[in-house]
Image (spheres, coloured by chain):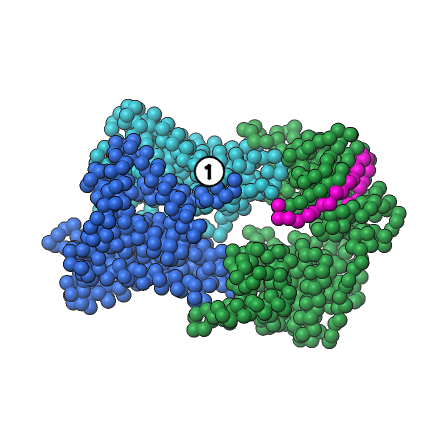
Chain colours: A green, B blue, C cyan
Amino acid sequence: MIVLREIHKVFPDGTYALRGVTLELKAGEVLGLLGENGAGKTTLMKILSGIYEPTRGAIEIDGRPVRFRSARDAMREGIAMVHQHLSLVEELTPLENIALLEGPSLGGLGKLLRGKVEAIARSLGFEVEWDRPVGELPLGVRQRIEIVKALYLGARVLILDEPTSLLSPPEVKSLLDIVKRLKAEGRAVVFITHKIPEVLPVADRIAVLRRGEKVGEYPPSVGPDVLVEAMVGKLKSWTLGREGEPSDVVLSVEDLWVYDRGRPLLQGVNLSVRRREVHALVGVEGNGQEALVDALVGLRRPARGSIRAGGLVAYIPDDRHGRALVLDLPLVHNAVLGIHRRFSRAGLFDWAGARRFAAKLIEEFSIVAPGPDAPARSLSGGNQQKLVVGRELSKRADLLIAHQPTRGLDVATTEYVHKLLVDVRNAGAGVLLVSSDLDEALKLADTVSVIYRGRVVLNKPAREATVEEIGRAMAGL
Amino acid sequence: MRGFLDSLLSLAVAIAVGAVVAYISGYNPLLVYYSMFVVPFTDVVYVTSALATATPIILTGLTFALGLKAGLFNIGAEGQTYMGALGAVIASYLAASALALPLSFVIGISLAVAWAMVPALLKAYRGVNEVVSTIMMNWIAYWLVIMEASTTFSNPMQPSETIKMPPSARLTPLVPGTSLTAGFFVAVAAALLVYWLLERSVIGYELTAAGLNPVAARIAGIPQSRVVIYSFLLGGVTSGVAGVLQVAAMPPSYSLATNLANVYGLGLDGITAAMLGRGNPLGTLLAALFLGLMEEGARHMQALAMTPFEFVKVLQGIMILVIAVRMLELWRRR
Amino acid sequence: MEAALVLLTQTIHAAVPILLAAVGEILTERSGVVNIGLEGLMLIGAFVGVLVGDVAGSGLIGVAAAWAVGLLLGLLHGAIAVYIRGDQLVAGVAMNLFGAGLVAYGIQAVWHVAGYRQTPSWALVDINAMTVLAFAVAGAMWYILSRTRLGVAIRASGEDPEAAYSVGIDVFKIRLFSTAVGASLASLGGAYLSLAYLSVVTKDISAGRGFIALADVVFANWNPLLAIAGALVFGFFDALSYWLQIFGVARYEVTRMLPYIATLLVVAGVIGRAKPPRALGKPFRKE
């Protein structure tokens, strides 16, 4: 039995992530760890798996206090974590990834290793192509490789961090089967998620975290309503008033093909977005969404097909650090990025005008910043996103491409961004919302499309679509 | 400010390591440094000579600084300077009057820019690494200019030189007896102009943004090709001017040595200056002045301490190594 | 026929320094570190080789010394890149400047001649032995990188250091080791130039070969076996330039441009299909 006792964690930047959480784990039990993004679930489990050290508090295994200085220490006690962002090297084969565990030596990869991993996979009821680069394998398979990796090292406690976030519904089902087998073998499993329906059928016990504290522990039988309230408390929600119906087309994509080093990423995508329409493109990550967005904003050259965008395009990327901001430059430089030519006076920069514009953005979108000259890096993630959203909306574009616009944001900012997107729609622009969050998509969309393996496999008005139907399409059924 | 402290620190480390190197090689470190850093200030002729030495380094430094700003490693100043000098020689060949001076700038800058455009276009449209392509262009320029200097444009009277600038087209010393010409002020003005362009112009904004985040810049409608071409174009201009001045404002010969002695190594000096100056045009200006002083000092060192002139290059290499280490940051992290 | 054989031999001999430096850089870059200081390392290797070979009276000791000095300088570059997280490109340029300065200074300070020193006969080494060594190193490097657990760890460090670190690979040590060994091979290439191939050390003996090696790395798509092919292409143009000169086909200066023009063309032709290691040049820090 493992006990986490009164765990506190304060990060160097002052974030108080955990405020005295106590949790028990038993062999042969599946513990559901439930909470919103930022509730502290992952931090708590990273402490258990030795990645972070707690600021205060203790870990006990069978009554014996232990201290982990690294993931290796935790591994030695049989505790392994399968991360949300999988830690496989995509350029290596699964076998090479597991050989890494043995450390560097001039020895070959060995037949023994292969026999062992194949046996583990069989015991869990699946097979893997061991000699193809991991990058070419589906995400569900990669996750299984991670589990094999953990068992190869002799893990008795397996922590799965948001294991379903990258999976299609059938893949989720087979993951749950694997979890049941692990449990049957007498191992302890921690299942971290913020999706209640997923954890109910498999958990023996559910612990709920909110803002770094444990709200309580529940048996699955309490049902979803109790758990929701435990997770989020009382929610203030915007009403998303839609005005007007979709009209003329602002984006039309026809028969679009995109390749990456000979591998097809898009295979004849057809798509259109109209004014006064939020068109949600949903799909499990890695089915071509990135390639489509890249092609739309000019980062990738299509091999075939056409893209016709009527008028000005605004773009809120999923990766704001990499794509929307220059973190080393001041806020004012970032506020005008992309519309900087509007501040050109015979080739010279109108800095006074740019500063006025930045000040206006700060006020209009309630961006918390010391002023226009603060480095973009010094803003918090939420305020950086508001800066990006504000800048893009102020373009008054005809088409807005929003790619995972609320990823990593807190609840209030998420709601705010949702409202802004609907406002843009109501003002007469078209919105292409690319999201892997089905709830977000259905809440905002007038039209829903599903992308699967580089093809649009479903396209219909949102009010006619059911969750089941979309789920099946996302899984390619 | 921090960059300046870093550069000072790198100088201190270089001097310390250099003292050991000098001592091991059998030279007196005190005499070495006395002649390098004190003697140049003892005579106005020496000071002006230091400024004249700094002149081309300012300009080639700007080439590298303009590249750095845009996130590029433009090592091509060396070859572009050769081409600029060749331009001045061609102008001298074509015109025997004062007209040769403006013609020098036109031909010299055009040749240097053409030389810069090859790696720029290869980078912009073929993704060729600019470090490799600019070095290759340097070597091609080296052999091309040596060939031209010793054939078509050779000086029948003095086989080790090309033909000279016509006397009326020369930029002669402003104070007789020194080597300080108007060329120095051209270089300073170029540094100020580049600084102003980067801070105040739209293209300066685009270079800066693309240098720090090329992907975000591309999405914002700043294509990498435009950034590369502008950065290399402006860099080609300053290096071209450096080459022209090394002929038109170079008393007493006002010509190009057939072994390229008066242009050789200026591109590398410029890299040193730009790195010491942290890629900032004004910092590069200051650093180039300092390097000019060091090299003037090295000439005295050669005479007084019998130490090879190249000792100064060892010091500069160490300084840049220390810059790479970013020592102050290391300190703060403790 | 005989002429063709001579041209072939010369091609192979001219390829050796580029091959050594390129294979070393492949190792370095596969681990995630960029070292553009190959030119400086070759210069220093050429100089140290002659200096030590001369004093010790043995070319082999000269070769060993050059290799060891390259290893030390590689450790320096590795430490800057890996532990201090300094700018790798700046450090590489610094190595080139430092090498150019040190060798020009050293030739004067040691032999009191300006920029040119004939290698004494007792310091020469067998060119064929070094050639065989270079090709063997390329083969061994291919085997290590693709077939051993060490190679897996090196590639993992260059592609995805976070993932490698999370499974217990000491990314820092792997990168330091790879950078040091990589640099030592460039220095070895320099010693080959001065002790076997050209029998002289000058202040610009490397003549851009360090950068041609960088081009070869890209050409080879980071594969040591393909680097052999690339080095032979460049070696061919190097050898050809001497031949064209001997037969008076073109002026000396024109033929000397050939290898550089060839490099430009080759690099311009192959880019696009090349796929560098994902974490190349990015310093790794623990979470």
Q: Residue at x 88, y 49 (%)?
A: A222
Picture quadrant where residue B13 is located: top left
Residue nearest the observer in this picture, B113 or B54: B54
Q: Residue at x 51, y 58 (%)?
A: A329
Could you say where residue C87 lies in the image, as x and y percent from the top left? 46, 46
Residue A385 vs A6, above or below: the answer is below
Other-residue count near label 1 (Cα within 10 Å), few / some / many at <14 / 14–19 / ≥20 = many
Determine whether, in the image, residue C275 is placed left or right of residue C9: right
Residue B161 vs A82, above or below: the answer is below
Residue nearest the observer in this picture, A44 or A389: A44
Determine whether, in the image, residue A453 is placed left or right of residue C169: right
Q: Is residue C11 visible?
A: no
To which residue does mark 1 refer?
C78
Picture quadrant where residue A207 is located: top right
Picture quarter with the C terminus of chain C: top right
Could you say where residue B310 lies in the image, as x and y percent from the top left? 27, 41
Determine whether, in the image, residue B286 is placed left or right of residue C223: left
Could you say where residue B236 lies in the image, as x and y percent from the top left? 34, 59
Q: Is residue C169 visible?
A: yes
Q: Is residue A278 magenta?
A: no
Stretch of the chain drawn in magenta: A12-33
Q: Secondary structure at mark 1?
A: helix
Q: Residue at x 69, y 70 (%)?
A: A423
Amino acid type for the residue under numbered disc 1? Gly
Chief SS of the magenta region: strand
